[in-house]
Image (cartoon, rainbow, N blue to C red):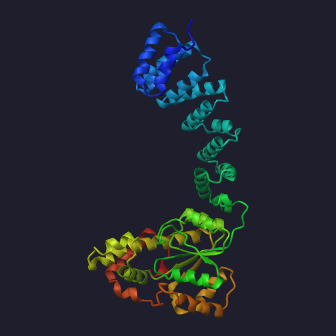
Amino acid sequence: MPTIGDNTALSQGRDLHRSGAFTQAETIYREFLSAHPDNVDALHLLGALFHQTSRTIEGLELIQKALSFAEDRWDIRLNYGVILSQAGHFERGAEELEKAYNANPNNEAAFKNLIGILRVLKRYDRAIDLLQNRDDLWALEQLQQIYGLANRTDKSIEVARRVLKDNPDDQLTAHNLHRALIVSSQKPSVTDIFPRRDGVDIGQHIIVAGMRKSASTFVSKMISQITGFDELPLASGFSYTYDFIDREILEYAFEKNTVSHTHCPAHEENILVIQAIGAKPVVVVRNIFDDARSYLDWILGTNYPYETVYKEFRKIPEDEHLSFLIDTFIVRQLEFYSSWQYLERAEKLDIFWASYEDMAQDKIAYFESILSFLNLPNSPQAVKEAVKITEAIPNHRMNKGITGRGAELFSDKNKARVKALTRYYPSVDFSRIGL
């Protein structure tokens, strides 16, 4: 009869095995098996050690032999299924893991390893059947992910919201929820983006998204001056050039009324945030050649140390400055502009297009239009006072409304180079920015 037991020698081998002393453990297991060749525990342990030391085939044979003596040992069967799966024998591994789980459904290792192999084999229905009867965090996270893998997006969103309600700091689930919302084109709730603010009243948040050097800073300061809303930078870093809205900043000012200035494009992640807070973006644009001219002037006159582009720019010969602008700055401005036009066409948000040229022509009418779009009270006198105060702010960087300077800087050849870039956006109308 096979022996199923333990003694001092086998315990010593197991301790060495667990500590990583594989050579010493193997010696003890072999010596023990020479005296007890059918000992189930020794066969199992030596088989597991063989797998860990790149002798998987021999290890599986030993564990299979152990099971032939003790078919009811679910713990050995569990390891057998895991090793089969790790060796790429997924079907056989799943079969053994099912047996181990059925023998002891309360064992977490058996449950989790079975779910893992079911995911590998894309047996999503079976995994869902097992998971939906559990309410612990790990099981709910797995259920949410597997619903997503099974293209059951609505259920994936439902479970993700359930998880975040009790675990608002679960970043992986939040990421998966946002991805599911994007895939399904569903509008997020405030708590989908800010689960830690569940039950808290949100303030009014205004977003001014502008091309660089389009006077978007001036626009945001004007709105802040007129409304009394706090100014809030929405992108990480000093330069506001990052691509994604910083949710932590918004969460910090969640209950306040704010106006935010950013150069972020209308990426899907940004759209989710804007939809969640109920903002109506003001998108500030400018003739692309004037924009580039002002940017060039700014680069040549700035000493901002955190903009890598400026450090490199001064190494470039002056006759290559325009090529640099076309290949770097203008490319990004076209991307920015296109992203917001795509968003407008998709009708995901109500957008107000504010042009630098309109502001240069009539500041009062310009800001009255913006305030009307935002459903904010305004009057010509209030706008005049705000313009006076804002323009008196030191270093507000407001270009004095000069238009047409860019055309004289760009030769016909360079203008053609800029125009050629628009071929990458065949459905976009660039007439707003002079192309």
> Which image quarter: residue 26?
top left
Residue 65 appears in the picture as rendered: no
- Quadrant the C terminus occupies: bottom left
Q: Is residue 189 left or right of residue 81?
A: right
- Does residue 192 appear in this view? yes
Is 238 drawn above or below residue 99 in the view shown?
below
Q: For residue 384, which quarter of the picture?
A: bottom right
The N terminus, quarter of image: top right
Apparent side of residue 320 relative to residue 191 in the rendered image (left or right)? left
**Image coords of residue 143 (percent x, y):** 64, 43
Residue under the point 59% across and 67% down: 346
Return the x and y of residue 194 as percentages of the image width and height.
64, 60
Give the image location of residue 225, x and y in percent. Answer: 61, 84
**Along the line of sight, the residue nearer the viewer: 182 or 38:** 38
Residue under the point 50% across and 21% down: 14
Of residue 160 and residue 306, the one placed in the foreground of this image is 306
